[in-house]
């Protein structure tokens, strides 16, 4: 069979919005095909299929919605995670 999955991640050095990088990657059969990175601000394709999708998504509403995820997904959760980690260390 074939396996398709997506991964969201937030990398951070502090709870400040400027110190957070949000990425959203799509994988197919363990191969990353396309990624959105908040530091780049758009989708980047790594395969022929990924490049075609990245071009389409960068010219549509998908890229605008994904840019907002840095604040709504990462920023909100980084504070919760940091507080939880600091109280347990």
Image (cartoon, rainbow, N blue to C red):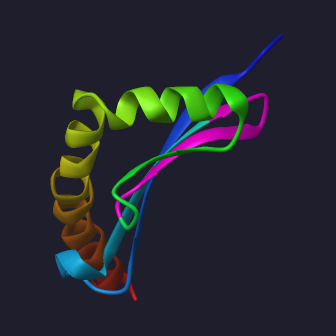
Identify the residue at image location x=30%, y=69%. Answer: 81
Apparent side of residue 59 relative to residue 52 in the rendered image (left or right): left
- Residue 86, horizontal then vertical, whole percent: 31, 86
- Residue 10, horizontal then vertical, whole percent: 39, 63
Identify the residue at image location x=27%, y=28%. Answer: 60
In the image, residue 52 above or below residue 86:
above
- Residue 33, horizontal then vertical, whole percent: 66, 37
**In the picture, residue 74 is in which quadrant?**
bottom left
Quadrant in which the C terminus is drawn: bottom left
In the image, residue 21 above or below residue 30:
below
Whether residue 30 appears in magenta in the rendering, the answer is yes
Identify the residue at image location x=16%, y=51%. Answer: 72
Quadrant in which the N terminus is drawn: top right
Apparent side of residue 77 relative to residue 9 in the rendered image (left or right): left
- Residue 34, horizontal then vertical, whole percent: 57, 40
Asked whether 23 or 45 is in front, the reply is: 45
Asked whether 68 or 8 is in front, the reply is: 68
Question: What residue range appears in magenta?
Answer: 27-38
Apparent side of residue 20 relative to residue 43 in the rendered image (left or right): left
Identify the residue at image location x=16%, y=60%. Answer: 76
Whether residue 65 appears in magenta in the rendering, the answer is no
- Name, please, the residue furthest toward the top: 1
- Name, please, the residue furthest toward the right: 1
In the image, residue 85 above or below residue 76:
below
Tally of numbered tags: 0
**In the picture, residue 15 is in which quadrant?**
bottom left
Asked whether 88 or 77 is in front, the reply is: 77
Overall secondary structure of the magenta section: strand
């Amino acid at each position: 069979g074939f396996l398709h999955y997506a991964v969201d991640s937030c990398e951070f050095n502090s709870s400040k919005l400027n110190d957070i990088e949000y990425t959203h990657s799509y994988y197919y059969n363990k191969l990353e095909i396309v990624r959105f990175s908040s530091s780049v601000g758009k989708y980047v394709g790594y395969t022929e299929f990924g490049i075609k999708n990245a071009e389409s998504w960068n010219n549509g509403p998908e890229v605008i919605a994904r840019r907002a995820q840095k604040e709504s997904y990462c920023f909100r959760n980084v504070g919760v995670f940091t507080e939880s980690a600091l109280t347990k260390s």
